[in-house]
Amino acid sequence: MKNNENDAVKATRQKLESIRNNLCMKYGEKGARRILTAVAVAVVALVALLILIFLFPIRSIAVSGEVTMFNEGEIIEAAEISEGDSIFLRSSWDIKRTIRKNLPLADEIKVTKTLSGTVKIKITFDDVKYYTKVDGIYYAIGSELRVLDSNESGAKYSAYGAVYVRLPETRPLEIGKKIVFYDTVEETDTEGETLYEVIDVKYYSYVTDFLSKLEDSGFWEQANGISLTEKYDVTLIYADKYKISFGSISELESKFRVLFGILDEGSTQYADKVEIDLTNPSAAIARPNPELDLGQYID
């Protein structure tokens, strides 16, 4: 047994000497020494890295900041880390980037790590302005129609003041990406014929225009629901009482001014339900309608 060990040691030594001689012949004595030194340093660095990975695991993950809309578990899941992982395997910047990718609603994120094995995540979120429903799933969206989050319940967003929006038919929604309307993408049959008229993306600019201007108008805070399914039949449900028909979004600023005047005048304040027609702002109409069904516009 001992002779076998000596033979193995001898063979290894000879092999190493052969490698060294080949390096000397190719790069010279100094060049070979530099290469061997670099290899030794790399091996030591690799061993040190492996030691850091295995001897310094994540022992705890602490989340602070806003943990209401998203709880600690959801934020940790979005960070894609767990206890037992190496604390040095991923940088704080990489963890932060992963959270932002998985939770586009995240506003400010700070990630710090300690040698004791604690990862600290401090996070705040943007306000949710709007949400919609596609194929039975609710999605938080921004006024520019970027998809920010999804959930099986719309209450997650309505509880924080988000306004429900009915949109034209869309393609399947993806977190972090903008909404694509169904008929803006061409589809053909087996013979290459288009299946429907393809609409220019610009046609749907009325959607983003209305949502962004609503935020600036002062009427967003008490808005309950918005129907934007038809370009020339935009409807706003306001203060759990008013159904406001804008028609198209032309002269939108004038229509908002007229709406303010109607509400400020106060003649409809004692009615339970009121219809306001702003299609022609110079001839706006407001009338009580106790049979008005607002539920079809509010999820």
Image (cartoon, rainbow, N blue to C red):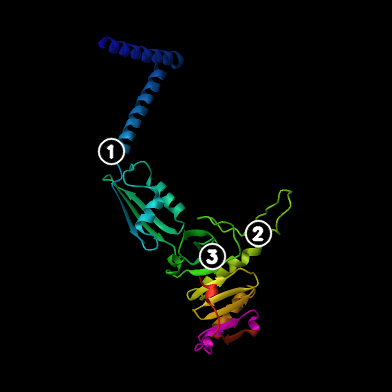
User: Residue 122 versus residue 147: which sits nearer the camera?
Assistant: 147
Residues under numbered marks 3 and 1 in contact, where contact means CB atoms less than 8 Å apart: no
Q: Callout 3: helix, strand or loop?
A: loop
**x and y, in percent, of residue 157 in the image:** 45, 66
Three-letter amino acid code at disc 1?
Leu
The label number, if any, that marks residue 143 in the structure image = 3
Question: Does residue 214 lie above or below 102 as drawn?
Answer: below
In front of the other: 25 or 243: 243
> How many labels were placed on the picture?
3
The CA span between labels 2 and 1 is 56 Å
Can you see residue 184? yes
Kind of residue indicated by mark 3: Ser
Q: Which mark is residue 1?
A: none
The image quadrant of residue 43 is top left
Indicate the secondary structure of the residue bearing disc 2.
Answer: helix
Disc 2 crowd rating (10 Å Cα; few below 14, some 14-19, many 20+) is: some
Q: Is residue 255 magenta?
A: no
Is any part of residue 28 visible from this angle?
A: no
Instruction: Tell me the residue that label 1 is attached to.
Output: 55
Along the viewing direction, whichever of 52 and 161 lies nearer the viewer:
161
Q: In the image, which disc is placed on residue 183? A: 2
Dot in front, 3 or 2: 2
Say whether disc 3 or disc 1 marks the residue closer to the N-terminus: 1
Q: Residue at x 38, y 19 (%)?
A: 33
Residue 290 at x, y percent in the picture: 54, 85
Measured as percent of width and height from the top left, residue 65 is found at: 35, 60
Which residues make up the magenta segment? Answer: 261-282
Instruction: Measuring from the top left, give residue 277's x and y in whole percent.
Output: 61, 81
